[in-house]
Image (tube, rainbow, N blue to C red):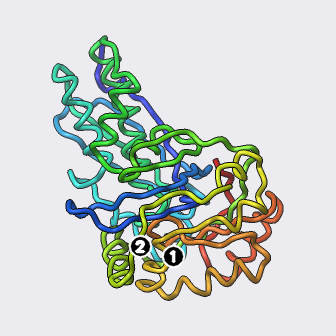
Amino acid sequence: MSTTALTEQAQAPGKVNLFFAAGPPRPDGYHDVASLYCAVSTVETVTATLTAGTGIAVGVAAVPGSLVAQQIGLGTFRLDAVPTDGSNLAVRAARAVLERFPELPGGLHLQIDKAVPVAGGMGGGSADAAAALTAVNRLAARACRAPGLDDGALLELAAGLGADVPFALTGGAAVGTGTGARLRPAAVGAPLHLVLVAAPAGLSTPAAYAELDRLRTDEDVPPPRLPEGLEEALAAGARRELAPLLRNDLQPAALSLAPRLEPVLAAGVAAGALASFVSGSGPTVAHLVADASAAEDLAGRLRGRGAPALAVRAP
């Protein structure tokens, strides 16, 4: 069998944190969190192909119409900002799988089709890693004519790659605790409709956490937990009851590092959004609206003002 004929493709979603509480820094430098993850309809796609060479090569493209494509069109992002070496999380994920298949012949090419903003607080790199885990696992199993890694083994590899990777692998909605990698499913009674707005430049997650700690230097930070009624409102599909319960402890840090996000949040409030919040460590802003029509309307208006904006569903 020709190795160059073997290709597998997988997708993994970006996410928003509908709720995110972070405790004080632990001795190891991490933070315990209580997070309500929700996957969105913006996905990353990774295509893995066996090659006749050696090593792992990477290609990157923007998905047409995506937030990434809009950023490129506005000149605020270049695809060469995405690393194609061993620092890319998808490459690390591929290597983690390949270690389990030492007999695999040839090299590997990963084509990453990006739709989720880079360093945008939406877990785009984690989604790349999750999609790479799935695609390379399928590919290696076919090439070696052997059973692939099961879901438990893939989740174990995912947890070793980063706190958001296990959720990107499972999708849906979930409560994350510990560093965020310990997950339990959350029920969703009806789809949520959001408008995502990308920023001109990304934010570093470690920098956001460092700023959070600085802002809370003199505070007695309680252990993180979800507020009462949050999961119940999500399970009931009660968007208006859900909206006032949404919170992100990293939002003040993101606004401190990127004050330009203030008018983006204000634009959602002015447009009648049920809630407007920074996603994860930022700087992507999410506006929760009443329905799909309202989402398309708001996204169109924001694009008309020169902002990269996209209406999405969650989960």
- Give above or below for 307 relative to 104: below
Horizontal side of 151 relative to 285 (left or right) equals left
Q: Quadrant of the N terminus?
A: top left
Crowdedness near tag 1: few (<14), some (14–19) or many (≥20) residues, C-alpha within 10 Å: many
Residue 91 falls in which quadrant of the image? top left
Horizontal side of 175 relative to 135 (left or right) equals right
**Image point (57%, 86%), residue name:** 262
Q: Which of 268 and 118 is in front in this view?
A: 268
Q: Nearer the viewer, residue 310 or 170?
A: 170
Question: What residue did someone put label 2 on?
Answer: 202
Q: What residue type is labelled 1?
A: Ala
| Element carrying mark 1 | loop
**Image point (37%, 34%), residue name:** 155
Task: Where is residue 260? Give x, y as percent.
Answer: 52, 87
Q: Which amino acid does label 2 sit on?
A: Gly
Question: What residue did someone put label 1 on?
Answer: 199
Task: Where is residue 4? Give x, y as percent.
Answer: 31, 26
Q: Nearer the viewer, residue 195 or 224?
A: 224
Q: Distance between the residues labelled 1 and 2?
A: 7 Å
Q: Nearer the viewer, residue 67 or 79?
A: 67
- Give above or below for 36 relative to 21: above
Number of numbered discs visible in the structure rendering: 2
**Image point (18%, 39%), residue name:** 55
**Image point (40%, 66%), residue name:** 119
Task: Where is residue 69? Give x, y as percent.
Answer: 53, 64
Crowdedness near tag 2: few (<14), some (14–19) or many (≥20) residues, C-alpha within 10 Å: some
Horizontal side of 20 relative to 28 (left or right) equals right
**Residues at badges 1 and 2 in contact (C-beta under 8 Å)?**
yes
Horizontal side of 207 relative to 41 (left or right) equals left
